[in-house]
Image (spheres, rainbow, N blue to C red):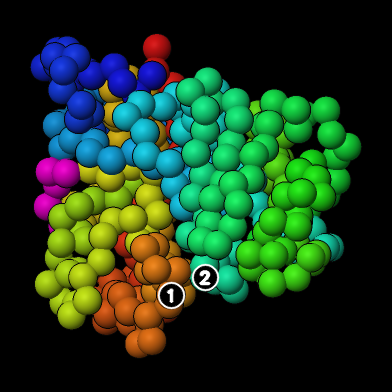
Amino acid sequence: MLSKLVAEFGELSASQKALLVAAGVGGVALLSAGGFLVKRHIDNTPPKQWRKAGELTELYIYPVKSCAPIVLQRADCADLGPQRNLLRDRTFMVTNADGKFVTARMKPKMVLVQPRFDERFETMYLTAPGMPELRIEVGALGAADSTRSTVWGETVPTVDCGSEAARWFSRYLLDKEDGYRLRYYPLKYTSRRRHGGDTGSLQDETSYMLFNEASVTDLNRRLENKVTALQFRPNFVVRGPEPYGEDRWRWVRIGDAVFRYEMPCLRCIFTTIDPASGVAHPDKEPLRTLKQYRQLPSYGESPAFGIHLGLRRAER
């Protein structure tokens, strides 16, 4: 569990809530050792030496893609992302009638849909402005008939969450009785090919995204309207590294859980949606400012902010 507090200097007091993050300092120079198999082995071998880089201050799971997160103090690390029993990261998504995914890029007020789970993390409840509470027994969905949905051009197995959930989202997002469905990804492993086994269930890129508080502080110095880390929808928020220090990390350790850097998180119009109001910024901020100084030559026009990770070793 991520609640186990371990540093390179031994165990921390269990009364401390922050977790330590470590950035790998070994192994990168060995990538020229020769041979594809050797390179692949080295790429997936965690370093033996670590340095203290900071503390984990916030932990988020987004059970419904494009909707609000649940804030946790601890979570399990699985290949599909952080989880607590049936609360798993981005295993639900809204689709149209044909099964194509719908996000807040199209319907910004999706970010105001607030999920919560019962204390056993088996039942999900959804609320939204002007809507009654919707209850979904997540455990029962495994017995539902399977269907196929599409996320970022990839077909994934899903189960439909039923007519009540469909009406709820259609009324909230379309002001109609039908048109949208809520679907659930039932597998414990990824069926997608992007980034191999690190793609997760219904995530955009990988199953973990890490964000540095100092980076958003630096961004806010350039903005008139300040933003928070939540505007960038991370799983992990860390405190301690200098701004953009995460760009140079190749390995990250939180407790005993070890993650490998996969790619920078490339930002899109989603970052302009205020998570508190569900309204997009009229001047496309902070995306416009990020494009002025965070574009990477090899990644085109989309600015990089945060890093995508893949799990390499769960906590022992």
Residue 121 as seen in the image, left or right of residue 316: right
Provide residue 53's location: percent of width, then percent of height.
16, 37
Q: In the rendered view, tell whether residue 316 sits above or below residue 52.
A: above
Q: In the rendered view, tell whether residue 111 sits above or below residue 53.
A: below
Tell me the tag on residue 303.
none
Instruction: State which region is magenta.
Output: 239-243
For the N terminus, the quadrant is top left
Q: In the rendered view, tell whether residue 254 sits above or below residue 218.
A: above
Separation (CA) of disc 1 from disc 2: 6 Å
Tell me the tag on residue 279.
1
- Using the rendered view, name the quadrant where residue 287 is placed: bottom left
Identity of the amino acid at label 2?
Pro
Q: From where the camera sits, is residue 140 visible?
A: yes
Residue where numbered disc 2 is placed:
108
In terms of sequence position, does the residue under pointer 1 or pointer 2 come before the other?
2
> Mark 2 and mark 1 in contact (Cβ < 8 Å)?
yes
Provide residue 82's location: percent of width, then percent of height.
46, 33
Q: Residue furthest right?
A: 145
Provide residue 49's location: percent of width, then percent of height.
21, 25
Identity of the amino acid at label 1?
Val
Q: Residue at left 75%, top 70%?
A: 176
Residue 158 as seen in the image, left or right of residue 11: right
| Residue closer to the observer: 273 or 1 | 273
Secondary structure that dominates the magenta span: loop
- Using the rendered view, name the quadrant where residue 260 is placed: top left
